[in-house]
Image: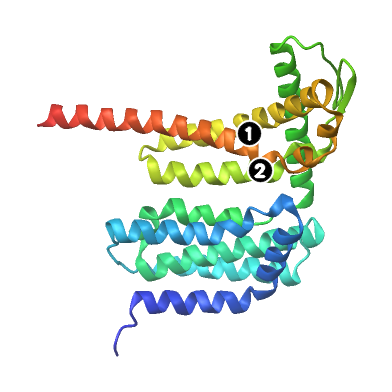
Amino acid sequence: MKKVPPGMAFVALTTISLIVWMRPLLATFSLAIDDDKYTHILLILPLAAALIVQRWKAEGVAVRTWTPAAGLLVLGLAMAALARWGHVGGGDDGSATLAVAGLVVWWIGSFAFCFGGQAVLSFAYPLFFLFWMVPLPKAVVDWIVAELQHGSVLAAQGIFLLFRVPVSREGITLTIPGLDLDVTSECSSIRSSLMLLVTTMVLAYLLLKAPWRRALVIALAVPLSIAKNGLRIFTIGMLGTRVDESYLTGRFHHHGGIVFFLVALALIFVLLWALRRGEISATSVVSRQTA
C-alpha cells in the first residue's frame, strides 16, 4: 500500500479540524470583529502560517513521522467534546476558550503526526504562537483591561510630574490645572497593546535568534505599551488645556491611538536593531575564535 505523503495527510487532518471546530471558530472570528479587545485574533492564523512558510523555505524540514503525536489529536478532540457537551467553568466564555485551545492542540498534533517531533521543535515558535487565537474569558480580559488602566494612570502621572505639571491622582482620575482626566476602560488601549505585543513577537522571531534576546524584547513590549498609553493621556490633557478643548473629545482623542502605537513600535525597532547588532557582533567574535 502506497504511503500517503505527509503534506496531503496534514491537509486532510486540517480539513477535518475545520469541519469539527467550524462553530467555535466562526464564533471566535465574529467576536474578534465585533469586540476590539479580541481584534488581534484575526491576525494570528495568517501570521503563523507565514512564519511557518518562511522558515520552511529557508531551512526545510526533515520529515520523520512521530506516532505518539496521535495523543495530541485525541486530546484536541477530547477538549472539543468537553467544550461542547461538558460543564465548563465560565459558561460560554469557558467553552469557547477550551474549544479553540483544543483546535490549536489538534493542529500541533497534526503537524507532529505528519512531519515528526523534530519538526515540531524546529517550528515550535510559530506553532505555539497559534495559541494567541484562543479567546480569553471575559473575566480575564476585564482584569487585563483594569491593570492596563491603572498602569496607564500611573504612567501619565509620572509624565506630568516629569514635565513639572501639577498633578494629583484619585483612583483612575488625574487632576491637572483646569482639567480632571477620567481614565476609563476605553483608555486602557487594550487593542493597540495586544497588537504591539503580537507584532513584537513576530519581529523578534524574524530578526533575532537567541531565545533570551527574543524574550527580552517581548517582555519590554508590555511596559512600553503602558508607557505609550500614559503618553497619550498626557498629550491629550496638555493639548486640551493649553491649545484647544476640542482635543478632549475630538478625532484625535478617539482615533489618535495609531500615532502612539507607531511611536512605541519605532522604539521596539530601535531595541531590535540594538539586540540584532549585538547578536551579529557576538557571532563574529565566535567565528574568529573558532577559525
Q: State the image coordinates of residue 257 (x, y, percent, origin top left).
A: 69, 39
Q: Residue at x 39, y 70 (%)?
A: 67
Splitting the image into 4 quarters, where does residue 236 fall?
top right
Which image quarter is the N terminus in? bottom left
Which image quarter is the C terminus in? top left
Q: State the image coordinates of residue 159 (x, y, percent, origin top left).
A: 70, 18
Which mark is first along the chain, 1 or 2? 2
Q: Is residue 136 visible?
A: no
Placement of 81 over or under 36, stated as above or below: below
Give, as a three-letter code, the residue at label 1.
Answer: Ser
Report which residue position mark 2 lands on.
Answer: 192
**SS state under label 2:** helix
Q: Residue at x 33, y 79 (%)?
A: 5
Quick one: label 2, few (<14), some, or many (20+) residues within 10 Å? many
Q: Which residue is drawn at 58% across and 33% down?
A: 263
Q: State the image coordinates of residue 111 (x, y, percent, origin top left).
A: 43, 66
Pick out the residue farthest to the front. Answer: 243
Q: Is residue 117 visible?
A: yes
Give, as a three-letter code, the residue at label 2.
Answer: Ser
Report which residue position mark 1 lands on.
Answer: 225
**Left or right placement of residue 196 versus residue 236 in this view:** left
Q: Which residue is drawn at 71% across and 42% down?
A: 190
**Left or right placement of residue 232 versus residue 265 in this view:** right
- Cα distance between the residues tagged 2 and 1: 8 Å
Q: State the image coordinates of residue 264 (x, y, percent, origin top left).
A: 58, 33
Q: Nearer the viewer, residue 178 or 281?
A: 178
Q: Do the residues labelled 2 and 1 touch (CB within 8 Å)?
A: yes
Q: Nearer the viewer, residue 52 or 79?
A: 52
Quick one: label 1, few (<14), some, or many (20+) residues within 10 Å? many
**SS state under label 1:** helix
